[in-house]
Image (cartoon, coloured by chain):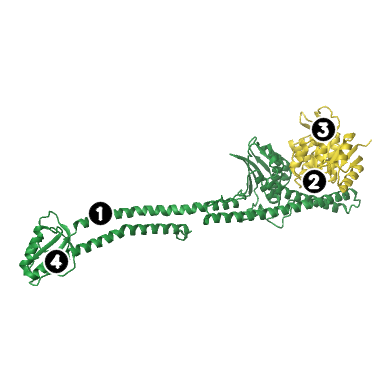
Amino acid sequence: MSQKILLVEDDADTADFIAKGLDEAGFTVDRAANGRDGLFLGTDGGYACIVLDRMLPGLDGMAVLAALRGAGLETPVIILSALGSPEDRIKGLTNGCDDYLVKPFAFAELLARIRLLIRRGAPAAVAETVLRCDDLEMDLLARRVRRGERVIELQPREFRLLEFLLRHADQVVTRTMLLEGVWDYHFDPGTNVVDVHLSRLRKKIDEGEARRLLHTVRGAGYRIGAEP
Amino acid sequence: MKIWHSTTFRFAALVFLFQIVAAAVLLLGPALLLRSQSHADAVAVAETLRDDLLDAYHEGGRPALSRAIDARVSRRVERASVLLLATPDGTRLTGNLDHLPPDLPPGAPYALEKLPRSGHASPEAMLIQSVRLRDGSILVTGTVVETERQVLALLERTSMIALALSVVFAAFAAYVSTRLILNRLRASVATLRDVREGRLSRRVPADDTGDAFALLGSEVNQALDRMAALNDELKLATDALAHDLKSPLTRMRAALDRAAQHVEDPLAQPFVDQALTESERLMAIVETALSITRAEAGMGRESLADADLSELLETVAEIYAPMVEDQGRAIVVVAPAALHMRVHRQLLDQALGNLVDNTLKYGAGTITLSLVPEADGAAVIVADEGPGIAPERREQALRRFTRLDEARSGWGAGLGLSLVQAVAHLHGGTVELRDAAPGLAVRIRLVEPPPRA
């Protein structure tokens, strides 16, 4: 059964673009063009994630969010906003949204973040001390990484990067998600800063191996996983 | 600077000169007048005496004259009179002088002599004249002016002392008056200097005297207001442009995104990718321009939050380390173990990122991120060992949309350093470009904000 996503967006073009993309990604999308409808559908529950535009006619996005949270709804909410200032982002995050994406955004970025939120919403396993992906094994307590029998020496920054990737194994992780997740750095340096980190990490993990684990997802970001 | 050409100096000299001249006229004038007046008086008295005696001589010859002289001397009617009758060869006949003064040719004008009179202990100053009578004998008449001389001498001495004092007073007056002018000018000068150094909101304090200095101050303020208004208009235009660009860019971005997902032709792929990259770049420019405007307007002060600046520097260094190492360079952090301060984390991250990015593009050698605690905050310095920026071009480098080298192309459209400056201003600080000998050191001063109310 495909997961349901509620999209609350008043701009028809943007809504079409997002809905089409989510549909292609295998989600079922319900659409609302204003805050009131969005709140009505949202309280119904059953959604894996709500994509909420911030500036809506009638009831504005932040009010919808407040009402949803007030009703005790835990559905993950990702806010889309044309307001790009850090202040707006901080305000959104403190008011109960789970992620905040500034327009314009790449669809791949939105998709990756939605998937991350849905995964996070799933009941988490007990605190793991060993992360695995195929024959790659990361011992968080001993701070040791092995691929099969081979011990991989990582710098602290590479260790944290790999840890983030392994915690989101088989998911697409975008460059900005990496910057935010690993370093809490909320600025896209724009240059290929992240790519250089990843290419170094890939060299240590995949070089000389028959199967590659660290994949580049064109136009989106990276994914670690056994599947090519 | 030639001191003689300085208006301040000339003004001081003029005040000094006029003070001295006025004092000299006031002090010496009366003394001179008094001197000539006392001289004229003495001469008049002496002449009357002489004329009286000559009358006696004409009426009764030498005996009558002799008697008249004796009478005047013995009666001591005229205490100040000097009389002497001598034979043609100069032998004293009668009178109150002991002998005929040697250097007194008959008929000469009144001469000032210092001679003793008979019956007086000390010589006295006197104005005397001699005339030769018809029979050849010589008559000397005159007036003692000793007292007047002494008074005049005293007056002269005190005048000289007063004049010496007036030099001191004149110097003081010159100093005070130039000080007064300089002090009145200082407010305007200080304001202009502050504005030049970037404190654009400074104005000359209000002055209701209505004089030339108040006028100058108000004109300076009006010029600064006009400048600020033009500045605001420019910012507003940039802001509006950025806002207006955002919507079409968003739609373009979405369209390109979909095109990228659906493009089948491998030949078209790189072009779509390039278009996406360029649209991202365009968005980054617009976002940065808006960030600068917001930061310069002081928006975002409410989101200053406590952060460890040392950790912040380490993070930036860590993020950029692989890129720096790929260039065969190093990035080091020189900072205390921890330094907590309330800052705008995201903007500061962006500012430091821009600076490291700049040195990656244009600099060379080791990149040093240093953190220096200061009394009222901290300074963050990003330095490299590259060619640096010439001193005369540093101010230009901080301006928006300016590139020092037109051939350079990069991500930020020349907004990098302007953003750094805007972020510094948001934190109540400044940006300085310095020579790191060799290399460029960009010093961002951050001032600890007052505790939140």
Q: Earlier in the sequence, mark 4 or mark 1?
A: 4
State which mark lies toward you, 2 or 1: 1
Q: CA distance from mark 4 to mark 1?
A: 31 Å
Secondary structure beneath disc 3?
helix
Q: Are marks 2 and 1 on the same chain?
A: no
The residue type indicated by label 4 comes to: Arg
Q: Are marks 2 and 4 on the same chain?
A: no
Residue A50: image quadrant is top right
- Where does label 3 land, which residue? A70
Q: CA distance from mark 3 to mark 2?
A: 25 Å
Q: Which chain is home to disc 4?
A: B
Residue at coordinates 93% horizontally, 37% vertically from top-left? A2
Who's yellow, chain-wise? A
Q: Are marks 2 and 1 in contact (CB under 8 Å)?
A: no
- Where does label 2 land, which residue? A82
Q: Which chain is home to disc 2?
A: A
Q: Which chain is home to disc 3?
A: A
